């Protein structure tokens, strides 16, 4: 597993994610068609029926994916090669850092409008009226949170359950990003996938938080984890972002605008306000944390 993970991270470093024909994009289109059939807005369904439909939709998406992945990765050279490819496609470290860089560079050049446009590609909040520091804060939050989703939780489920585990995790994460909203359309239909995503992220999020604390300012990180994370809406994102902010010694959280409405969020972290350089510091924290996880994978491989 250490060799497979190392090769996958090397491919990610060399090539980042595919610019075209990424499997997750194709999966997203299939999931969209499935949702339109089972969550038809022109048909009146009870919340109970929509929850059942959402549950069935998740099963239809995940169970075949598990068995197909298991079939494609036998215990031989070809299976290992396919496994490397799968892990490479599932981990989004370089892509996440590149998105952050696409926001940082315009900010540094004073091109705030361009930075807003780049930020809008990775967050759901309104970016039109954001100033430089707001953009830096939102980007740093995204890097820290998605560090868990796109990197460390994916690695965790690969180490626990092999290629099928990382595939099911990433597909669940994708479905949650599509269906996990608490609005009229998805509140009932997306209920199950949102809970499943929370469950699959519970342990990885806390391991990610420990990693951020270990690779940053341990004292501030653990203090922010204990004092701030319980007040965040998400049980996992709050842990990751509060600890990451403390590790970096930066203030995150606070009010933001979503779909035209101001949403008051708890403050996270401590120390200086976010600034453009904070984005780079968060990216470097991801790099150090990834190296630590790779070392841990090597130790696990030797023990097992």
Image (cartoon, rainbow, N blue to C red):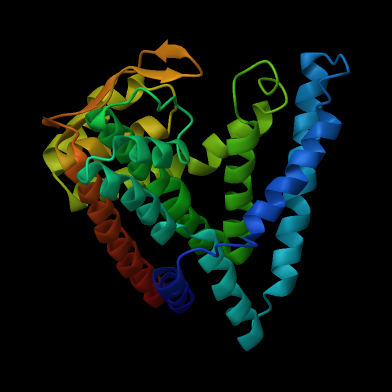
Occupied quadrant, residue 256:
top left
Establish if 144 lies above or below 228.
Answer: below
Left or right, 109 with reference to 187 = left
Q: Residue at x 34, y 19 (%)?
A: 231
Task: Please provide percent x and percent y for residue 69.
Answer: 70, 65
Q: Residue at x 39, y 50 (%)?
A: 99
Indicate whether 204 appears above or below 120.
below
- Which x, y percent locates residue 193? 65, 35
Quarter occupied by residue 21 = bottom right
| Residue 89 shows in this picture | yes
Query: In this view of the protein, which residue sits in the foreground, 27 or 244?
Result: 27
Q: Residue 291's spot in the image, x, y percent?
A: 29, 65
Out of 35 and 101, give the one closest to the viewer. Answer: 101
Q: Is residue 18 left or right of residue 222?
A: right
Instruction: Say whether residue 76 is visible.
Output: no
Relative to 255, residue 284 above or below: below
Q: Nearer the viewer, residue 257 or 165?
A: 257
Residue at 51% from the left image edge and 68% from the top image edge: 88
The answer to which image quadrant residue 184 occupies is: top right
- Above/below status of 133 relative to 201: above
């Amino acid at each position: 597993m250490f060799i497979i993970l190392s090769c996958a991270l090397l491919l990610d470093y060399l090539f980042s994610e595919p610019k075209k024909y990424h499997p997750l994009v194709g999966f997203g289109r299939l999931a969209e068609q499935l949702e339109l059939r089972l969550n038809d807005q022109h048909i009146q369904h009870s919340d109970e029926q929509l929850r059942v439909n959402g549950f069935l939709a998740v099963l239809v998406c995940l169970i075949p994916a598990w068995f197909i992945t298991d079939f494609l990765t036998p215990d031989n050279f070809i299976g290992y090669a396919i496994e490397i490819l799968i892990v490479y496609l599932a981990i989004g470290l370089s892509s996440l850092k590149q998105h952050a860089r696409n926001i940082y560079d315009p900010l540094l050049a004073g091109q705030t409008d361009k930075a807003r446009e780049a930020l809008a590609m990775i967050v759901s909040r309104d970016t039109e009226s954001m100033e430089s520091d707001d953009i830096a804060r939102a980007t740093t939050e995204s890097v820290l949170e998605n560090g868990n989703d796109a990197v460390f939780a994916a690695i965790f489920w690969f180490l626990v359950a092999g290629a099928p585990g990382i595939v099911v995790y990433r597909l669940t994460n994708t479905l949650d990003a599509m269906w996990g909203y608490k609005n009229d359309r998805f509140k009932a239909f997306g209920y199950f996938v949102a809970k499943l995503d929370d469950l699959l992220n519970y342990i990885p999020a806390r391991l990610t938080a420990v990693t951020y604390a270990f690779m940053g300012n341990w004292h501030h990180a653990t203090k922010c984890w204990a004092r701030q994370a319980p007040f965040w809406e998400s049980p996992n994102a709050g842990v990751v972002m509060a600890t990451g902010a403390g590790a970096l010694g930066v203030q995150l959280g606070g009010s933001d605008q979503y779909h035209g409405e101001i949403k008051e969020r708890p403050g996270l972290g401590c120390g200086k306000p976010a600034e453009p350089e904070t984005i780079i510091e968060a990216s470097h924290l991801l790099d150090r944390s990834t190296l630590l996880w790779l070392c841990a994978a090597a130790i696990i491989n030797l023990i097992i």
